[in-house]
Amino acid sequence: MASQAPGDIPFVRDFDKGKSRFAGYWSLWSNSKDLFQDAYDSFTKHGQPCWIPGSSFSKHLALPHTYLPWLAAQPDSVFHHREAFNDLLKSKWSLGGSKYIMEPWSTRLFVAKLRANLDALIQDFCSELPSAVAEQFGEKRTEWTEVTVYGAMKTIFIRAAGRWMVGPTLCQNGEFNRLAVAYMETVFYVSGILHYTPRILHPLVGPVASLRQQYIIAQAKKLVRPVFEDRLQYLSFSSEKDAPKDFLYEAMKHAYTTRREDFNLHDITIYGLYFYWASCHQISLTATFTMFEILKSDAEYATKSRLQEETVRVFGADGPTWSRATAAQCSLMDSTLRESLRLNSFISRHVFKKIMVDGVQAPDGTALPKGALTCVISRPLHTDHELMTEGGRFIPFRFAAAHEIPEGTPTDGAGKKLTAITPDYLPFGYGKHACPGRFLADAQLKMVLTHMLRYYEIELSPKNPCPRPVIHREATLPPRRAMILVRRRAKA
Ligand code: HEM
């Protein structure tokens, strides 16, 4: 391919010509699915970057996925992912401040905690899970209960992950969990409003749009205060053996020792809420989509019973004992989750970066302009029929080990794991800034779905026999009110 200057990079559907720029923003609002498909089919699939309409009436640069190995090798001083997220999320207004995303100490702390003992986090989650599910699904054994899946999943993840994040007292506080869910949702509500507001108006619209988030933060602070004050005593202990082992305490300790400007109730609360958002939002969506996919595909693939048999094969008749190692043995569940995430990623673009310097040249010689917000269009890539047999269909066990793939099912995906990132599979991003929580997400998703299938009978509700994803602007969401029927099994 011939090299080109920044001015030569084409705009999808020629949206840079005349009045078409407005039509471009309208397509982003009204039918982003087709817009991104066009950009992929016409340009990025063939190794060519193109401009697409972007947030706040700007333009973004869609890069081909074949650039990814090169992109991953670029330093943050050239391609910066936090600058891009700060811009996209409008974090000053949506998160409660830009520093929660721009200052990465909480992420570094989390990664260190994961490396030190991932299994301890898995155990914490596991210990809270039965009560978290029972709270949403109930314990009735004779009658069916109707459950709104997306709402239930959000609260289950917030409560069970809260065990390793904020400890047993706060994670079981229903009011605190409602606020954590509300914070997560409000992040998108605020950034969504600003996404479609011209940048020049952000200083006026931002404060108004973020009023609800400020209220949520203020209420959350009241509930965090007693826990925060209780933990102050441990910071002054010379011996740490009695200190709580959760993320909240470790964040307080880190701020106390190395970031005094963040050592206060306000900042620690927002860092905590930000972490709930990072760790519980996409996982609740994935669990919801996967539950629907399991139920919808059951008639054709016996999905439920094959997953149940796998649990018995891996864990025996007794209750499961979870660790990273046992989670890795659940190959059919792994495949079902990967397949669900491939088709139902929350967003249609991944690997966002901002170009920080002049003179950047892509591998094919194309000059990439400073200041551009770049991304890789992922949904059409994940479903491309030329890259994967029947790419648009949900086939639960296509990624299982070759000998477990049922006859008649495509085998070109055999053995690909949920968390294995390649340039054509991007739900967790790509490169050194790919999701650091994905190995924990892997285990948590398997724990939740296995627990539900093992201890509950679950059916689609006749009220919504075929729940389908809803594309809302750029986001893919489960139908908010879609329900399932659940009934506690007499015996697991
Ligand atoms: C299905 C579930 C999940 C999906 C699809 C997902 C996806 C992602 C993606 C796409 C990113 C951005 C990567 C980039 O910069 O390109 C990300 C970042 C992040 N994820 Fe996940 N994630 C999931 C679950 C989790 C969980 C369970 C945790 C924590 C327990 C977590 C923690 C984080 C953190 C801390 C970041 C920000 C990293 C940073 O600050 O650089 N995620 N995730």
Image (cartoon, rainbow, N blue to C red):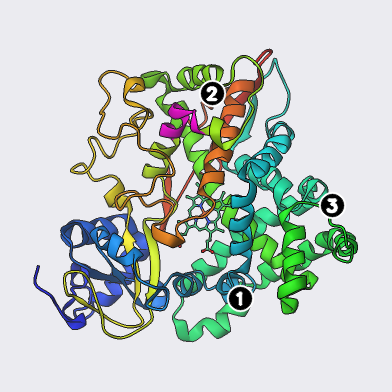
Kind of residue at badge 1: Lys
Residue 220 lies in quadrant: bottom right
Residue holding disc 3: 241
Outermost residue on the front side: it is 238
Q: CA distance from mark 1 to mark 2?
A: 44 Å
Q: Is residue 207 left or right of residue 223?
A: left
Kind of residue at badge 2: Glu
Q: Residue at x 67, y 66 (%)?
A: 271
Q: Foreground residue, 109 or 447? A: 109
Kind of residue at badge 3: Lys
Q: Which residues are magenta?
A: 328-336
Secondary structure at numbered mark 3: loop
Quadrant for the C terminus, please.
Answer: top right
Residue 213: x percent and y percent?
66, 67
Q: CA distance from mark 2 to mark 3?
A: 47 Å
Q: Is residue 12 left or right of residue 376?
A: left
Q: Residue at x 46, y 82 (%)?
A: 199
Q: Foreground residue, 153 or 107? A: 107
Q: Earlier in the sequence, mark 2 or mark 3?
A: 3
Q: Earlier in the sequence, mark 1 or mark 3?
A: 1
Say few, some or many: other residues with alpha carbon within 10 Å of mark 3 (under 14 / 14 to 19 / 20 or more).
Answer: few
Q: Are marks 1 and 2 in contact (CB under 8 Å)?
A: no
What mark, if any, has residue 459 been given in the picture? 2
Residue 432 lies in quadrant: bottom left
What mark, if any, has residue 328 been given in the picture? none
Q: CA distance from mark 1 to mark 3?
A: 32 Å
Q: Residue at x 43, y 40 (%)?
A: 418
Secondary structure at numbered mark 2: strand
